[in-house]
Image: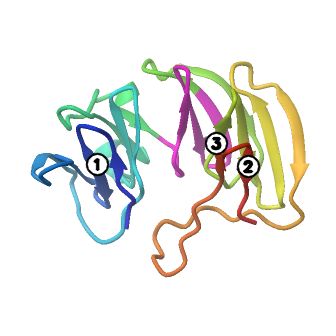
Amino acid sequence: HSSPVVTADGVYVSYSGPQAYKFDPSTGQEIWHYRGPTSGGGGRTAVLYDDNLYVRGAYTPSYDSHWGLVLDAATGNLTSTSGPGYHDSNVAPAFDDGIGYFLEGSVLVARSVPTNAELWRRADSAFVSAPIIINGTVYEGSSDGTIFAYSGISGQLMQTLSVGSPILRPNETTVSRPLTGFGAGNGLFVVAA
């Protein structure tokens, strides 16, 4: 069910287990396959940043109860067996200028890449969206229809916006009714609410 991540040298897909793959974009030939401890239907879209592939859906005791893994995009190997090799974002993380933004439960956490050191955190029990970054500002949506805008560097709250209806958590497991979250482009910020 995951959408592919496509670059000039690879097409990446991720499935439950996790099972992650890299294919040659011109031939479709498998370059690598990361085999997690289980497999099954479904899957969540991976995120590629700084030569690392962030996959989700690994919440098992085999992974010390972490939600996701960080794989080396060139080899498919786990980047580390502790610290940066794992992440806890339950939605697609966002990255900008050496900082990753992860929604860990209902807490938005900014972490340095690649050390994984926490830079700042903001909590709201209603946070549900995958974060998005527009011009250095991180936007996070809540189930009550509020969008919070934070400085990507300091985490300072810059603005709140009400969209007038609830924002739903991304649903990446129901193909017939996927909910993907925010989008941005051509001077527009698109909110599914």
Dot 1: element:
strand
On the image, numbered disc 3 is attached to which residue? 132
Residue 92 counted in the magenta span? yes
Residue 88 appears at what percent x and percent y? 49, 42
Along the viewing direction, whichever of 124 and 97 lies nearer the viewer: 97
Residue 116 appearing in the image: yes
On the image, numbered disc 1 is attached to which residue? 12
Q: Amino acid at mark 1?
A: Tyr
Q: Earlier in the sequence, mark 3 or mark 1?
A: 1
Q: CA distance from mark 3 to mark 1?
A: 21 Å
Dot 2: element:
strand
Q: Is residue 23 above or below residue 17?
A: above
Residue drawn at x 64%, y 42% is: 132
Quadrant location, the N terminus = bottom left
Q: Amino acid at mark 3?
A: Ile
Q: Give yes or no for contact between labels 1 and 2 (Cβ–Cβ under 8 Å).
A: no
Residue 187 appears at what percent x and percent y? 73, 43
Relative to 91, 127 lies left or right: right
What stretch of residues is rendered in magenta?
A: 88-110
Q: Earlier in the sequence, mark 1 or mark 2?
A: 1
Quadrant location, the C terminus = bottom right
Mark 1 nearby-residue class (10 Å; few <14, some 14–19, many ≥20):
many
On the image, numbered disc 2 is attached to which residue? 189
Q: CA distance from mark 1 to mark 2?
A: 26 Å
Residue drawn at x 74%, y 48% is: 188
Residue 184 appears at what percent x and percent y? 66, 47
